[in-house]
Amino acid sequence: MAVIVGSFLVGIGINAFLVPHHLIDGGVIGIALILHYFFGFQTGLSMLILSVPIFLYAWYYERPFFYSSIHGLLLTSLFMDWLSPLKRVFSISILTSSLIGGAIIGMGIGLMLRYETSSGGTDMLAKIISKSSTLDIALAIIIIDTLIISAAAFTLGMEIFLFSCVTIFIIGLITSVMKVRD
């Protein structure tokens, strides 16, 4: 149930709040969003294809991560493409979109991580880094996402870059709060 709800929340956050302003998340989703904005590719399908190398690594070296994340990847990719009509639903400011979108995506990712699953991609990479170091998984996600968004900054413009950084910060913050088990 956590994978279904978490994937659904990620799909809502991406399509209803990030896509209308061309904001990006970091990681594989961020790369998939850039491909969507510049080439019109389906975001979920792009995410699925881009995640193949990480999943191959997990298959060979971190098999439990592979098994705990494959269904999250498939469902998140599916919801991201199914919910793409949401990009025409809301008409709110870029700041509000970055805050609400970040919170919804963070809740989705945090919920999945709380139950030892994820949407794969850099979430799985962050789990691998966190397992092999003392770095908190939410901080690992923020670092990876910031590196990817920084590499894409020149194509997005400074305003989109800055609001995307706000989004990533909120995602990391909410993920950190959500992943804590009682």
Image (cartoon, helix red, strand yellow):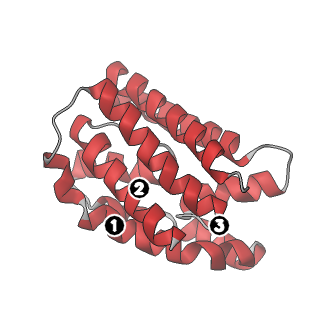
Q: Residue at x 33, y 25 (%)?
A: 95
Cα separation between marks 2 and 3: 16 Å
Q: Amino acid at mark 2?
A: Val
Residue that label 3 marks: 115
The answer, for residue 45, to whether it is visible in the render is no
Along the viewing direction, whichever of 47 and 123 lies nearer the viewer: 123
Residue that label 1 marks: 79
Mark 1 is surrounded, within 10 Å at the Cα level, by few (under 14), some (14 to 19) or many (20 or more) other residues, namely many
Q: Residue at x 85, y 55 (%)?
A: 132
Q: Residue at x 38, y 63 (%)?
A: 8
Q: Amino acid at mark 1?
A: Phe
Q: Amino acid at mark 3?
A: Tyr
Expressed as whole percent of the image width and height from the top left, the position of residue 147 reads: 57, 36
Q: Secondary structure at mark 3?
A: loop
Judge left or right: residue 20 versus residue 139: left
Judge left or right: residue 139 versus residue 118: right
Mark 3 is surrounded, within 10 Å at the Cα level, by few (under 14), some (14 to 19) or many (20 or more) other residues, namely some
Above or below for 8 versus 135? below
Cα separation between marks 1 and 3: 19 Å
Q: Secondary structure at mark 1?
A: helix
Q: Secondary structure at mark 2?
A: helix
